[in-house]
Image (spheres, coloured by chain):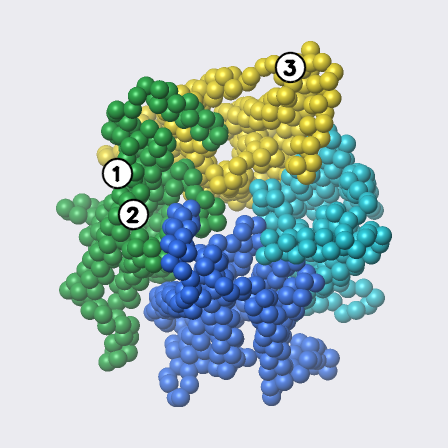
Chain colours: A yellow, B green, C blue, D cyan
Amino acid sequence: MGDFKGHILPGVFLITLGIWWTTKCVLKYAFKNQKQTSYFDPKALFCRMEMLEGIVLVGMALIGILSGQFIPGGPHLILYNYKENQWVRLLDWHHFTIYLFFGLLGVTNILCSIRSLPPSFSKLMLLNALFVEAFVFYNHTHGREVLDIFVHNLLFLAICLTALITFMELFIQAKITVELLRTSLFLLQGSWFWQMAFVLYPINGNPPWDLVDHNNIMFLTICFCWHYAIAIIITGAIYAFVTWLVKSRFTRFCPSEVELLKNAEREQDSEEEM
Amino acid sequence: MGDFKGHILPGVFLITLGIWWTTKCVLKYAFKNQKQTSYFDPKALFCRMEMLEGIVLVGMALIGILSGQFIPGGPHLILYNYKENQWVRLLDWHHFTIYLFFGLLGVTNILCSIRSLPPSFSKLMLLNALFVEAFVFYNHTHGREVLDIFVHNLLFLAICLTALITFMELFIQAKITVELLRTSLFLLQGSWFWQMAFVLYPINGNPPWDLVDHNNIMFLTICFCWHYAIAIIITGAIYAFVTWLVKSRFTRFCPSEVELLKNAEREQDSEEEM
Amino acid sequence: MGDFKGHILPGVFLITLGIWWTTKCVLKYAFKNQKQTSYFDPKALFCRMEMLEGIVLVGMALIGILSGQFIPGGPHLILYNYKENQWVRLLDWHHFTIYLFFGLLGVTNILCSIRSLPPSFSKLMLLNALFVEAFVFYNHTHGREVLDIFVHNLLFLAICLTALITFMELFIQAKITVELLRTSLFLLQGSWFWQMAFVLYPINGNPPWDLVDHNNIMFLTICFCWHYAIAIIITGAIYAFVTWLVKSRFTRFCPSEVELLKNAEREQDSEEEM
Amino acid sequence: MGDFKGHILPGVFLITLGIWWTTKCVLKYAFKNQKQTSYFDPKALFCRMEMLEGIVLVGMALIGILSGQFIPGGPHLILYNYKENQWVRLLDWHHFTIYLFFGLLGVTNILCSIRSLPPSFSKLMLLNALFVEAFVFYNHTHGREVLDIFVHNLLFLAICLTALITFMELFIQAKITVELLRTSLFLLQGSWFWQMAFVLYPINGNPPWDLVDHNNIMFLTICFCWHYAIAIIITGAIYAFVTWLVKSRFTRFCPSEVELLKNAEREQDSEEEM
C-alpha cells in the first residue's frame, strides 16, 4: 500500500462512492419534490440500488484486502512471524482493517435492503467504518517526515468531520444540506488520496517533494481547501444536472394545471425550509 | 487492582452489562414492533428487570470496592498514612471511585424502578459514571511505559465515545441504532479490559510484551478495531436471536389476517425510519 | 484575589447559585406535575423570582468587582502604569472580567423578567458568562506550579462541561435531567473553589501542600470526583425535599377523585418520559 | 496582507456583515411577532435583500482578492516561481483562499435568492467558508513570535465557535438567540482583526508591543473578552433599536382591539419560549 497505486486505489473508490451518494441523495430529493406530478414511483428502484451499493462495497473491500495482502512482499494473511519474533508488515494490516469495516458496511447495506435489518443500521455501520478509518490513520504515521504526517493529518481531519456529521445524523433526521455536506467530504477524501499519492510517491521522474520544507506544508494547507472547493463545485454540478434531468424526464406530459399546482407547492416547500 | 485479576473482573462486569443492555434494548424494540399481534404485555416485566439491574449493579460495585480495598496489601479504607506523611495506594482509591459511581447508578436504577425518581435519571447517572470513569483513567497513568499509557488511552477513548452518546441521548430521544452503538461500545470496553490484562500482566510463563516497542502500539491499534468488529458481530447475533425469539414465541397463535396487518405495518415503520 | 478569601468568595456565590437554581428547577417540575390538582398558580411567583435572581447576581458581581479592585494592593481601576511601563495586576483584572460577565447576566435576567427581552436571552448570557470564565481560567495560570495548574484545569473542565450543556440547551428544549446536571456542575464548581482555597492557601498554620508532588495530583483527581458525588447527593436531597414539600403543601384539600386522576396522569407522564 | 491595512480591511468587512446580519435577524423576528397587526409583508423585501447581500459578498471577496494579489510585491496570481524553485508569497495565497470561499458564499446567496437552490444551501456555504477560514488561520502562523501566534489563535477560537454554531444550525432550526450569538461572534471577529492590526503593526510612531512578554498575553486575554462584551452591547442596542422601529413604524394605525389581541399573543409566545 505504501506506494503510488496504493493511494490511487482508495481515491478511486472514495470518489466513486462520493459521486454515487451525491447523485442518490439529489435524486431522492428531486423525486420527493416532483412526486405530485410524476407518474414514476422510485421506491423499488432505490431499494434495488441499495442492494447494488452493498454488493459494490463488498467488492471494493475485497479488492482492497486482496491487493493489499497478496501483492509481492505483502503479508499474505500472516500476522506474526514467530521465527523472527516480529509483526509482519503492520501497515498493510492497518489498511486491511479499514477495508474490513467498509466490507461490513456493504454487508449491512445488503441486509438492510432485504429488510433483515432496519434501514438506519447502514448509517450506523458507516459511522463505525469512518471511526475506524480515522482511528487507524491517526495511529498510522509514527516516525515519518513532517510533511508525510501533515497530509495524513489532513486526511484524518476530513474523515473526522465526515464521522461527526454521520454521528449527528444518527440523532437528527438528515436534510439534503447535511447529506450533501457529507458526500462532498467523501469527494474531498478521495481527491486528497490522489494528492497524497502525487506528493509522497512522485512518478515519471518528477523530483520528489521536500518532506521537511515548511513552505510545502503552507501550500498543502491551501491545496486542501482548493480540493474542497472543487468537491463543492462537483456537488453543485451534480445537483444541477440531476434536478434538471428529473424535471425534464419525469414531468413531460403533465397538464398545465398540475404544473401550476406544482409551482405553488414548491414555493411553499422553499418557505418552510427557510 | 494492578494485576491480571484486577483487569479481568471489570471486563467481566462490563461484558455482562453490555450483553444484558443489548438484549434489553432489542427486546424492547421487538416487543414494540410486535405489539399489534402479541398477547403479552412486557411493561411489568421490564419494570422488574430495571430493579434487578439496579441490584446487580450495586452488587458489582460492592464486589469491586471490597475486593480492591481488602486484598492483601490493599488500602483497607485508609486514605492517608499520617506516620509516613503519604497517601495510601491512590491507584486503588481511583478504582474505588469508579466503582462508587457505578454503585450510585445502581441505586438510581432501583429508585427509578419504584418510581421515586423519573426514569430518565438513570441515564443521567450513567453519564456521570462514564464521565468519572473517563476522567479517572485519563489521570491514571502517570510515569508508566508508553504501551501501558497507550492501552489506557484506548480505553479512555472508548469511554469518552460512550459518554458522548449518552450525553446526546439526554437531549434527543434515543433510537435503537444509538442504543446499540452505546451497548456495543460497552462490549468493546469489557473485552479491551481483558486485552489489557493479557498485555500488561502475561500469565502462564508467557514472555512479557515489550512496553516500549512501537510495533506493539501499531498492532494494538488494529487489535482495538478487531475487538470492536467482534463487539459489532455479537450485537448483531443478539439482535438476530432476540428478534427471532420474540417473533416465534409471542406470535404463534395470531390469525392470518392479523399477520397480514402486521406485515403492512412493519413495512410502514421501515419506510418511516428510512 | 490570589489568597484564601478570594477563592472562598466565588465558592460561596457559586454554591448559592447552584442550590438556588436546583431548587427553582425542581419547583417548576413539581408544580408542572401537580398542576391538575393544585389551586396555586406559580407563574407570578417565578417571574418575581427571576427579577430577584437578576438583582442578586448584579449584587454578587459588584461585590466581587469592588472587593477585587479596592483591597489594599489592588489595581484601583488602573489598568496600565505609564510610569513603569507595565500592566497593573492583570490577574485581578482577569477576575474583574469574569465578574463583569456575571453582572451582565444579572442585567439580562432583570430585562427578561420585565419582558424587555425574550426569556431565552438569559440562557444566552449564561453561556457567554461561562465561556468567558472558562477562557480566562485557561489563560490564567502561566508559570505556576504543576499542582496549581492542575486544580485550575479541573475548574476549567467543570466550567467547559457546564458551558457545553448550556450550549446544547440553546438548541434543544431542556428537560429536568439536563437542568439538574447543569446545576449540579455549578455546585461542583463552587465546592472546588473551596478545595482550591484550602490546597493553595493553607490556613491556621497547616503545612502547605507540596505543589510538585504527583501523588497530590493523583489524590485531587479522585477528590474532584468525590466533590461531584456530594454535589449529586445534595441535588438528590433538594429534589426529594422540594417534591415532598410541593406534594404535601399544595394538594391537601383535593378530593379523592382528583387524587386518582392525578395518579393516572403521573403514570402516563412517567411512561412518556421512559 | 501582512500589514496594518491588510488587517483593517477584513475587520471592516466582518463588522459590516455582523451588523447587517444582526439587523436582518432582529428584523425578521420583529416582523414575525408583529405579523398579526402589520399591514406590511416583508417577504419580497427580504428576498431582494438576500440578493443584495450576495452581490455585496462577491464584491467584498473580489476587493480582498485583488488588493491581496496586485499590491506592489504581491504574487500577481503566480503561485510557483520555477526559476528559483519556490512558492510565491504563500501567505497571500492563504488570504486569497479565504476570500475565495466567502465569494462562493456570495454566489450561493445569489443562487438561493433566485430560487435555483434551496435557501438552506447558503447556510451550508457559510459553514464551509468558516471552516476554511479556521483551517487556514490554524496553519498560518508557523515560526512567528508567541504573541503573534496567540492573537491568531484567539481569532481561530472565535471562528471555530462560529462554525460550531452554524454546524448545529444545519441540523436544528435556528432560534433568534442562536442567530444573535452567531452574529455577535462575527462582530467579535471583525473587531479582533482591528485589535490585531494595532498590536502587530503599530502606527504613528507608537512603540511596538513586546511580542514575547507574557504580560501582554495576559492582557490580550481579557481584551478579547472586553471586545466580546462590546459586541454583545452593540447586538443589544441593535435589538432595542430595530424592535422599537418596527413597533413604532408598522403598527401605528392598528385599532385598539387588535392591540389587545397582539398583547395576548405576545404573552403566549413568551411563555412558549420559556
Specify the label residue A85 is tagged with.
1
Q: Which residue corresponds to mark 2?
A: B47
- Taking the spot 28% from the left edge, 78% from the top edge, the residue there is B85
Q: Secondary structure at mark 1?
A: loop
> From the viewer's perspective, is C193 left or right of C79?
left
Specify the label residue C27 is tagged with.
none
Mark 3, chain letter? A
For the residues labelled 1 and 2, the Cα–Cα distance comes to 54 Å
A165 versus A58 height, above or below: below
Q: Which residue corresponds to mark 3?
A: A250
Q: Secondary structure at mark 3?
A: helix
For the residues labelled 3 and 1, the Cα–Cα distance comes to 65 Å
Mark 2, chain letter? B
Q: Nearer the viewer, residue C116 or D162?
A: C116
* Residue D238: x %, y % from top left: 76, 58
The image quarter containing residue B27 is top left
Amino acid type of disc 3?
Phe
For the residues labelled 3 and 2, the Cα–Cα distance comes to 53 Å
Both labels 3 and 2 in a single chain: no
> Callout 3: few (<14), some (14-19), or many (20+) C-alpha neighbours within 10 Å?
some
